Image (cartoon, rainbow, N blue to C red):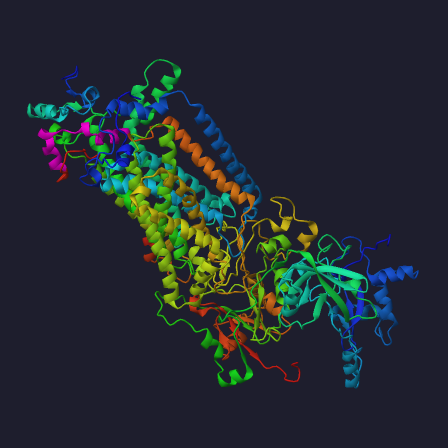
Amino acid sequence: MSDVHFTPVEEELAHGAEAPIEYLGERNLLPPTITMRELTDTICAPTENKTPRAWWIAFGLAVSVAGILGASVAWLLFKGVGVWGNNSPVGWAWDITNFVWWIGIGHAGTLISAILFLFRQKWRTSINRFAEAMTIFAVMCAGIFPGLHTGRPWFDYYMFPLPNQMVLWPQFKSPLMWDIFAVSTYFTVSALFWFIGLIPDLATLRDRSTGNALPQKIRRFAYGFFSVGWRGSNRHWQHYERAYLILAGLSTPLVLSVHSIVSFDFATSVEPGWHTTIFPPYFVAGAVFSGFAMVLTLMLICRAVFGMKDVVTMKHLELMNKIMLTTGSLVGYAYAMEFFVAYYSGNQYERYVFLNRATGPYAWAYWSMIACNVIFPQVFWFKRMRTSIPADVRRLHPYQHRHVVRALRHHRDDAAPRLSPGVVGLLFSPTMWDMGIYIGTFGLFFSLFLLFLRWLPMIALAEVKATLPNAHPHAGHARHDADDHGHDGSAAAVPAE
Amino acid sequence: MTNADGEAVCGGPDRRAATSPSTRPPTPASSAAEKLRDAGYTKFDAHTPYPVHGMDKAMGLRDTPLGWIVLVLGLAGCLTGFVMMTWMNGIDYPLVIGGKPPDAIPVDACR
Amino acid sequence: MTKWHVPRGHELESWGDLRGLDGTISIQQPLISPMFGGRSDVEVLAQLAGERNWRGYYLVRQTLRALPNFGTVGFEAEWRRVLHRGFVPGTAESPRLLPVEGSRIGAALGAAPAAADGFEAVFLADPKLLDGRHANNAWLLELPDPMTRITWDNVALLAPKSAEQLGVRDGDLIRVTREGATVELPAWRLPGQPEKSVGLLMGWGRKHTGRYGRDVGFDVFPLRRSDALHAAPVEIQKAGGKHPISQTQDHNSMEGRPIAIDATLEEYKANPTFAIQRSPMPRALPLWREVEYVGHKWGLVIDLSACTGCNTCVIACQSENNIPTVGKEMVARGREMHWLRIDRYFVGEDENQPEVSFQPLGCQQCEEAPCENVCPVEATAHSPEGLNDMAYNRCIGTRYCANNCPYKARRFNYLNWHTNHEASGEVPETKRLQFNPNVTVRMRGVMEKCTYCVQRIEMARIATKVAGRGLRDGDINPACAQACPAQAIVFGDLNDAASRVSRANQISRHYKLLAEVGAQPRTTFLGKVRNPNPEMSA
């Protein structure tokens, strides 16, 4: 860290001394005095310093929790899906709930990295690496569930188009098949996006690993291997930027399509409460909402722990809160619309299901969900709330909880017996193995995340550098900016692309 | 600046930025590249810690063909997927699934 | 306490003779030699009586030998003929008419002790276990009670109003006392149970009966003595505590939905198509060309007017299709495996005088089956004869099909039911002997459901081909249709206009369950017409 003193932006905000604002993408997000070297040092430090004890403790904890996952999965495989609380008619419960939830968590990463990139939101550069890593780990956690929720997971390969002795093929009318392809595409594109963004930063780490000690040699080799010969040449940058743009272009429809297709699992069914056209946009909004909550949680912790307050400033948090307000309200609209459509359809089964949702045995879950997802975010209409850390912290718990509740609600609904009230209106109650596998995925997620924090640059170094005020060609060279970007107005920042 | 191989090596603004944070505007490497380009050099390169805008033009580089490669491969993948699904469900082993035609195209749209 | 136990041979292992309703003598022949050295009742009696030749075979032959006019052509030849026929011709008795003395019946009814203030206990033979003789039969233990839909337990049946007075809810333990004898058992509210009356089901709570029936349910025999075999005055207190109850259906009412559609005789006469009017087919043009089935097109019709909810079809199906039992805890989790279930609904305004409708429900074999669309691996698809087939060895168990089934007719093997829920392990030898060899035994993680007894269809097809003729109506009977004593279930070829099932489909009471979903079920129903005898109503 440097000894240069700069004014924390938080203080500026607190005293009302705002940096001049042109428009959203153009404000100075970072302290104006930070230098490139300071930035490089700050961001590379966690990967180069001695492993802090806190990291070991956290990692040990995370791996132990991941061990719960291992034990739960082993027991599940040995005994069968019956160790979970799933029943008939609740054929899907926490298994698919957790899948939907984790996929949703991943959405914020892609949104930040792709859509905000295409919209030239420069504030994303401080958080995108972080959010992308979260996406990938979340999708990995999500991928566990569809694989394990089947009755005979050792035959899961039947879902892939492989020739087999039964000469049968996958059945492409099934939304589960769409899921397989949507999620694997999403994972591939997200991983590529993340990796391509990492290449220049890995090269920086490689170049900083000087010395002949064995750890340095290993670092040089590993970072060297994965930075695939990056030298920062302008020819590299040219391809790199195009590849990044293409991947952003591909990821953007994926953000919308993945959760839309996940929602098709329900929306294309004939079950009342599931058979709803509002599901795709509603799932996406909900996913972005909960994903942002997750990014914020992780970011608040890392920002405090690793001293990154200058890179991830209160302005970033405020902007993220605005997105949460928007998506929370979108979700609220979807809730209201579901009710209206159930009423307007005149279908007695639909009406029953929705009334049952609000007044039946799961009413507590429903109303706590409404409170957390719709009502609570409304405090972010106030700037003071958007820019206060306590508000962020308070919000986190319910936010993470809500998605569970929401998905559970969907999966529970088929127990509200549509057609044959003859079916037992069974309530779902999770077993210890349901909880074990769910909690265990958190262990896996945080294990991966801690490895990421320790060994990879958690902030996109090259991209942040490009947004620094001193990365700009001034006056005489404004022509290039004008050529490339039309009206950038002030030369406050060179776009990162 | 030229190195032993005859390539021009331009330092990025990093070095200067490190010494004088925000007071002095950096001299962009691109103006040096422009001069080299105008002097007729083609085999030179610029190394920067982040992409510098206008550098492609300043160095006289052609546009990257990456977009076209991706387009062709993407369309090929799309076609392969479509043919695969139609052949598997519609031609190789058609079954009556939900009373629907086995090779219906609308179901291909969602995958 | 007894010190000696005799291994009692099963009736399928023993020789015996019996008389039919008209008195015809018939021969009971064993199907298998005794598996565990069991002896039949007559064999034990013969041994106690000191017979040297006590084997059942010998005893039966002895009995026949003693018949007059038996064996005029030589005993052995006649014996073989009788064995072949199964009965002895010409042994029927001539019927005699006996006068019914109505006054004595009335007196007997009036003799029931009327409870002054307290409750009156009514001792009822259990619909499944009778007096307890079937208490170790897991099939019957898991079979839901026709009225309460309770499995693996018996309860004290109370009128809803009486339960309210006692302050008990379903499953709350009550103490039933009669002259020092006390029984504690869970209360249950049953619409139609008279007030101040408690129905007690006999045959449960046996201490020595085997591994399934031991300590299952509550023994009510301490309250029943020879002075009051059918009803007795009792006192009831709330005992505190709750007993967990496993039900397969907890809805009592159809809540206004057209599920098991019924009408009174007057309504039916005024409007013979009442059923299809309440559950009309959706009016929409098809989005694609519908599949046409040439050759056979199997269908099933269930007449709700005939169904009495006796559960025979359920057990027949369980026996035919190797359906496992899952136990009380798993039923509580909704994991029962019955391919065919009977839904019971209370109908009517008055809780004390409800009508009841029963509706047997298995896979409806939909033409446009929602389950097939969602299976990712083609494990369920239509056969060329339009059956909704399950390929067990292809099924990976996503359970999506069950989620998307409007009728909730699909059952999932959450655990390895046949090996006592263990992940691996041998299926017991006796159980293997019990299996139907023509039906796959399903392992854990596989979805299953009613197949219309496809194995019987194939067997009939082969048999008629061997016999050199085509399939005729009536050649194929699924287990449920075969077992139904009311002949409420009819199976046949819908492409054959003369078949019973096609004719049943022409009946005006005909309707499709949940037609509005558009799945076009092949199993259809005939609406129930009520025509109660006014003299029988209270």
On the rendered structure, is C267 left or right of C215? left
Q: Of all residues shown, which one is farthest toward the top?
A: A212
Seen in the picture, residue C378 relative to A147 is either above or below; the reply is below
* Most common secondary structure along the magenta stretch: helix
Residue A284: in sight, yes or no?
no
- Between C534 and C283, the one nearer to me in the picture: C534
Q: Is residue C205 visible?
A: yes
Q: Is residue A478 magenta?
A: yes
Q: Going by the image, does C512 lie left or right of C70?
A: left
Q: Is residue C40 left or right of residue A384?
A: right
Q: Residue furthest front?
A: A15
Quarter containing the N terminus of chain A: top left
Judge by depth and name the residue closer to the eye, A408 or A179: A408
Considering every residue shown, the one lying at the far right of the view is: C50
x%, y% of residue C79?
81, 69
- Residue at (6%, 23%) from the top-left corner? B39
Q: What is the number of callouts on the image?
A: 0
Q: Quadrant of the C terminus of chain A?
A: top left
Q: Quadrant of residue A98?
A: top left
Q: Quadrant of residue A454?
A: top left
Place of residue C243 in the rendered image (x, y in percent of width and height, measured from the top left): 66, 56
Residues rendered magenta in the picture: A461-484
User: A362 or C141, which lies in front?
Assistant: A362
Q: Position of residue C431 (x, y in %)?
A: 68, 53
